Image (cartoon, helix red, strand yellow):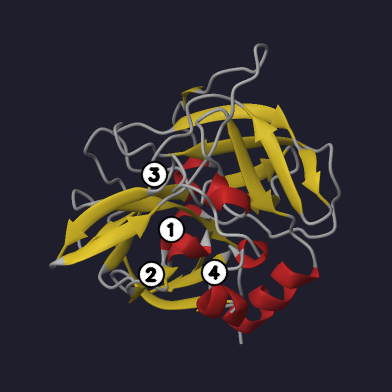
């Protein structure tokens, strides 16, 4: 596998606890007719999406994550490069803040308890496995899915799907969103074109009109090298297997 020539535009770099965090790659590549993301208005479904940051909601940001349905009601999905790298290993001290907006954390912050990534990501940072499932601890004896709900993971959906992609650029205290149609990048990677997905939006869920998550910004080029074209690993048996590992 040839090395990637440069780090992606969506990859955030922050220093926390004397550790350099290399996180949040996303992409959006420009085409003349591609739309541009807009500020995401608050609603219950979007409150399932939030920031991954260090220690507190106001701490250094890494990426975006979202709540997915699981037996224990405590599971998130994001990109693997948001939470694990060969340079520093697993990122410590992460918290998830669903529905974060303009400094306000309506549901509080949920400490990350366990991270599940494919061994092929751990060993080689293989872009074919740039997906992670993240378990969070309860807050006030309440699991995160019970607080905000969760979206089901769907696999084997194919290309040409209409999805809404909502995420948190590091430079903004409000999430952005865009409704687009997925396209094939390769048999195992897919893409969409919409501007504005910069540092921090890696891990943003690709949510179908039926409410299922079928991708997250990541994969090829760790999500992309520009802010106008974003990528995802195709959610297929690889992701189904990883989800099973995360929930057992």
Image-quadrant location for residue 151: bottom right
Give the x, y percent position of residue 72.
Answer: 54, 77
Q: Would residue 134 appear left or right of 214 to someone viewing this image?
A: left
Distance from the alpha carbon under mark 1 to that under mark 3: 24 Å
Given this view, does label 4 or label 1 mark the residue nearer the observer? 4
Mark 1 is surrounded, within 10 Å at the Cα level, by few (under 14), some (14 to 19) or many (20 or more) other residues, namely: some
Given this view, does label 1 or label 3 mark the residue nearer the observer? 3
Query: Which of pointers 3 and 2 lies earlier in the amino acid sequence?
Result: 2
Q: Are marks 2 and 1 in contact (CB under 8 Å)?
A: yes
Distance from the alpha carbon under mark 3 to that under mark 4: 19 Å
Q: Would residue 133 appear left or right of 143 to someone viewing this image?
A: right
Q: Which residue is mark 3?
A: 200
Give the x, y percent position of residue 87.
Answer: 35, 71
Residue 125 numbered mark, or none: 4
Counting every numbered tag in the picture gives 4
The answer to whether any part of residue 187 appears in the image is yes
Mark 3 is surrounded, within 10 Å at the Cα level, by few (under 14), some (14 to 19) or many (20 or more) other residues, namely: many
**Residue at x 52%, y 46% (from the top left corner):** 204
**Residue at x 84%, y 43% (from the top left corner):** 159
Given this view, does label 3 or label 4 mark the residue nearer the observer? 4
Distance from the alpha carbon under mark 2 to that under mark 4: 34 Å
SS at badge 3: loop
Give the x, y percent position of residue 19.
Answer: 20, 67
Q: Identify the residue at the far bottom of this view.
A: 248
Residue 142 numbered mark, or none: 2
SS at badge 4: loop
Q: Which residue is mark 1?
A: 147
């Amino acid at each position: 596998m040839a090395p990637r020539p440069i780090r992606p535009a969506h990859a955030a770099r922050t220093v926390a606890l004397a550790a350099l965090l290399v996180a949040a790659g996303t992409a959006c590549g420009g085409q003349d007719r591609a739309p541009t993301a807009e500020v995401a208005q608050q609603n219950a479904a979007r409150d399932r999406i939030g920031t991954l940051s260090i220690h507190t909601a106001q701490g250094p940001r890494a990426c975006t994550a979202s709540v997915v349905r699981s037996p224990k009601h405590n599971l998130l999905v994001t990109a693997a490069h948001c939470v694990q790298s060969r340079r520093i290993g697993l990122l410590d001290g992460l918290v998830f803040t669903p529905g974060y907006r303009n400094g306000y954390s309506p549901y509080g912050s949920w400490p990350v308890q366990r991270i599940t990534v494919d061994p092929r990501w751990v060993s080689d940072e293989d872009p074919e496995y740039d997906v992670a499932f993240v378990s969070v601890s309860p807050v006030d004896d309440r699991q995160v899915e019970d607080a905000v709900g969760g979206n089901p993971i769907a696999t084997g959906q194919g290309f040409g799907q209409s999805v809404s992609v909502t995420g948190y650029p590091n430079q903004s205290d409000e999430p952005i969103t865009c409704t687009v149609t997925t396209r094939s990048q390769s048999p195992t990677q897919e893409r969409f074109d919409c501007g504005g997905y910069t540092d921090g939006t890696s891990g943003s869920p690709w949510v179908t009109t039926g409410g299922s998550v079928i991708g997250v910004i990541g994969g090829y080029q760790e999500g992309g090298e520009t802010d106008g074209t974003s990528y995802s690993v195709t959610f297929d048996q690889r992701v189904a297997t990883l989800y099973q590992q995360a929930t057992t």
